[in-house]
Amino acid sequence: MKKSKIIIGILILAGIFIYTKKNYIMNSLHSGHNMESSNKDSHNSMNDHGSTHKDPINNNINKFSRKLLIPPLLEGTVKNGVREFQLTSMEGEWDFISGTKTKTYGYSSPILSPTLLLNKNEETKITITNNLKEATTVHWHGATVGEKVDGVHNSEIMPGTSKEIAFKLNQPASTLWFHPHTHSKTATQVYKGMAGFIYLQDEVSGKLELPKTYGVDDIPLVVQEKKLDSNNQIITESNQMEKTHGKIGGYMTVNGVISPTVEVPKGIIRLRLLNGSNATKYNYSFEGKIFHQIASDGGLLEKPVSMTTLTLAPGERAEILLDTSKISRKFYMIVNDNKALEIEPKGIALIKDIPTSLIKIEPITKDMLESVASVRKFSLSTKGDKNLINDSLYNFKKVDFSVKKGAYEIWEISNSTGGMNMPHPFHVHGTQFRIIERNGKTPPENESGWKDTVNLNPGDIVKILIKFENDGISIYHCHILEHEDGGMMGQFEVK
Ligand code: C2O
Ligand code: CU
Ligand code: CU
C-alpha cells in the first residue's frame, strides 16, 4: 500500500508542476512579451505523437479538436465578359475559445473572407459594401494595379455605402491577398479579422501537374495572432511597446482558428502560406520533414526549392509542396516553436510526384541593369519611438519622388535599425519586383522569383530591380502594420 501512496504523491506533484507551468506561460504571453522569449520555456513533457514540440503559445486550447476553417471559394459570375464578385465588410462574432463570443470584423463572414478565384487578363469587378460603423478601404496586395483601384488614396468606403472596383491583372498566376488600408487604421482593421486570399490562375499554372483541388490538396493557410482580454475580446489598442515593435504575441490562429486540425490526402499536398500577422515574423516547419517551396509572393519559382524551415515576414506568401504519402500518423505545422496546425494524412492524393521544374521566369539581363533610369536608397531606421524611412515620416501631402512609367529602377533598401533588433518587411504597391542582391550576394533561390515584400533584418541591405506600369501615386511601406500606421511609409508618382 506504500507504493500506491508514493504514486499518488508523484501524481500530485506533477499536477502542481504542470499547473504552475501553464500559468507562467499564460502570464508571459499576456504581458506583451516577444514570443521567441516565452518559447524558451516550451520544452519538456507531454509530447504526443513523438513530437518534441509542445504548444506553448496556445497552451492546449482546443487541443486540435476544431476543424481547420477552409474559406469558401468564390468564382464569381461572368456577365458580358466581366467576372463579378460581391463582398461585404461586416462585424461578426467568432468563438476563438469554444463557448465564448469574440467581436470580430470580416468580409462576408465573421472572420477573414471567402477566397477569390481570379483569372489572368480577365476583366474583374468587385463590389464592396461596407456594413461596418467606420470607413474602410480594400487594398489588393501584390496586384499590379494603379492608384485608382489600389485602395489607398481617395478610396474610402463610408459606412452603409458600396464601391465597385474594377481591374484586370496581367501578371503571372500567384497567391495574392487583400486587406483594409485605411489611413492609420490598417492595423486594427486587419487585427479584428479582415483579410482574404486571392488565387490568381493562368494557362501556365493550369497545365502544371500541381495539386489544385481547393481545400483538399490545395489549402490556403493564414497564420495570425490574437491578444484577447479577460472577456475574450480582441485587444486592438497598442501600448507603447506595441507601437514601437508591433503587436506581437497572443493566441496563434490558422485561418482564424486556434490549434485546428485538418485531414489531407496521402501524396503531394500544396499549402499556400500567408503571414497575415500584424508584426511577427514566422518560421514554419513540419517536424523536420523536407518540403518544397514552389512559389514566392508574385508567382511560381523556376523549380521547387527543398528546405526544412521557411521564414515569412508579415505580408509575405509562399506556396509549398509536402509529400505525405509515407506519413502514417498525425503531424504538425510548427510556427515559431508552437504547434499551429495538426495534419492528418488519410486517403489517396491525385498528385504523387514533386515536379522537377515549374516555369521560366524572365532572366535579369545586363541590358536591363544598364537601362536603369534611377538608383534610389531607402534607409529604415528607428528614432525614439518612431520608425522612419529616409529619416522621415509619411506625409500624405508630399510626393517623395517620381518614377518614369515602364523604366527599370534599382532600389537599395537598408535596415539601419541599430541595436533595436527590429526586422522591417519592405513592401511596394502596384508592382512585383526581383531581388538582385541580398547583403552583397545573389539572393537565395526561394527569393529569386517575383516579390512584393522583402524582409530586412537589422543590418541587411537588399537591392531590388523594379518597374511600374500603372499611372498615379503609389506607396511603399513597412508591413509591420503598427509601423505603417505610425508613418513608416512614403509615396511616389508614376508618370
Ligand atoms: Cu499589404 Cu500596403 O499592404
Ligand atoms: Cu500592398
Ligand atoms: Cu517596420
Image: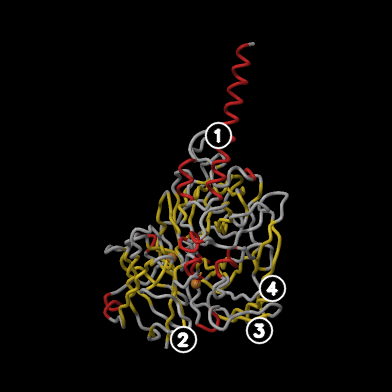
- Circle 3 crowding by C-alpha within 10 Å: few under 14, some 14–19, many from 20: few
Q: Secondary structure at mark 4?
A: loop
Answer yes or no: disc 1 within 8 Å of ligand 3: no
Q: Are marks 4 and 3 in contact (CB under 8 Å)?
A: no
Q: Nearer the viewer, mark 1 or mark 3?
A: 1
User: Can residue 142 be seen from the camera position used here?
Assistant: no
The disc placed on residue 133 is 4
Disc 1 and disc 3: Cα gap in Å? 59 Å
Side of 67 relative to 50 (left or right): right
- Identified by mark 3, the residue type is Asn
- Circle 1 crowding by C-alpha within 10 Å: few under 14, some 14–19, many from 20: few
Q: Nearer the viewer, residue 381 or 399?
A: 381
User: Can residue 215 be seen from the camera position used here?
Assistant: yes
Answer yes or no: disc 2 within 8 Å of ligand 2: no
Q: Nearer the viewer, mark 3 or mark 2?
A: 2
- Identified by mark 1, the residue type is Met
Disc 4 and disc 3: Cα gap in Å? 34 Å
Q: Are marks 1 and 3 in contact (CB under 8 Å)?
A: no
Side of 135 relative to 174 (left or right): right
Residue at 40 percent of width and 52 percent of height: 306
Q: Are marks 2 and 4 in contact (CB under 8 Å)?
A: no
What x and y, as percent, mark residue 113? Answer: 63, 65
What x and y, as percent, mark residue 399? Answer: 42, 84
Q: Are marks 3 and 2 in contact (CB under 8 Å)?
A: no
Disc 2 and disc 4: Cα gap in Å? 32 Å
Spot the residue most to the bottom.
495
What residue did someone put label 2 on? 471
What residue did someone put label 3 on? 80
First in residue order: circle 1 vs circle 3: 1
Q: Secondary structure at mark 1?
A: loop
Disc 2 and disc 1: Cα gap in Å? 57 Å
The disc placed on residue 91 is none
